[in-house]
Amino acid sequence: MLLTVTDVHKTYATADGPFAVLRGVDLALGAGQTLALTGESGSGKSTLLHLIGGLDQPDHGAIIVDGVDLAPLDDKGRAAVRRGTVGVIFQQFNLIPSLSVADNIAMQARLADKLDRDWVTTLSDRMGLTPHLRKYPEQLSGGQQQRVAIARTLAARPKLVLADEPTGNLDEATAAEVMALMLELVAESGAGLLMVTHSADLAGQLDRRLHLRAGTVA
């Protein structure tokens, strides 16, 4: 398995006392497989995605990514996993305003020392970004910025792609187009994809669906 999550728990302190966001979640994802993570707001979807991406640590349970147990790793170790194995696509794009489109796309691959210019060119062409490579994020539409964010993630050839509502800020037509391109390119790269979405239509395009309710698998 590319990803195995076993009995993961996560609790946060609130003004009203401890709040259990995740209460014993299990899931598995193989290389090349796609899985939609659905559920109402507050069900723990984004929290689980952040834990798998090494952006936070569970209180209990195991998260194993490509054979590496994240639990004993410190911040530096988890960052190394993100650079080398995991790519994250956020709803808010998170592009660097001072970098051109070309440099934003290449940034993550450069950090991971995995820059393949032929692959970057392919991504730019397929995402329709080649005419915009010298522009800056503020000069692009929302759909174009999300294409840059997806290309940036895939440029580093991650084995596991985590996508948190990747089309949530886009209109319906643009979302469908961007989603189709993302699924095509993820499949061509051979990566596994775990995507958080509220959309039943988008979830239906993936191999499997896992529904969270109140921090557990429904």
Image: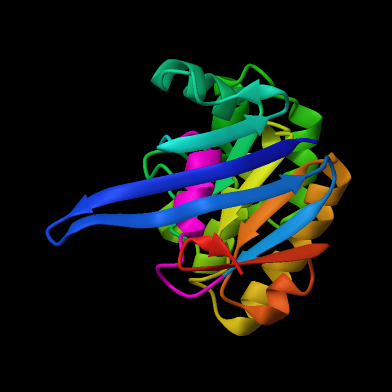
Residue 74 location, x and y as percent? 42, 18
Above or below: residue 43 compared with residue 111: below
Comparing 31 with 9, the one in front is 9
Comparing 188 with 97, the one in front is 188
Above or below: residue 110 compared with residue 188: above
| Left or right of residue 110: residue 135 | left
Residue 38 location, x and y as percent? 60, 69
Q: Is residue 88 visible?
A: yes
Q: Is residue 42 magenta?
A: yes
Comparing 59 with 127, the one in front is 59
Start-end of magenta stretch: 39-54
Q: Is residue 148 visible?
A: no
Q: Quadrant of residue 105?
A: top right
Residue 79 location, x and y as percent? 48, 24
Above or below: residue 105 compared with residue 164: above
Instruction: Name the residue furthest left.
Output: 15
Q: Residue at x 58, y 24 (%)?
A: 81
Residue 134 location, x and y as percent? 54, 44
Q: Residue at x 61, y 69 (%)?
A: 218
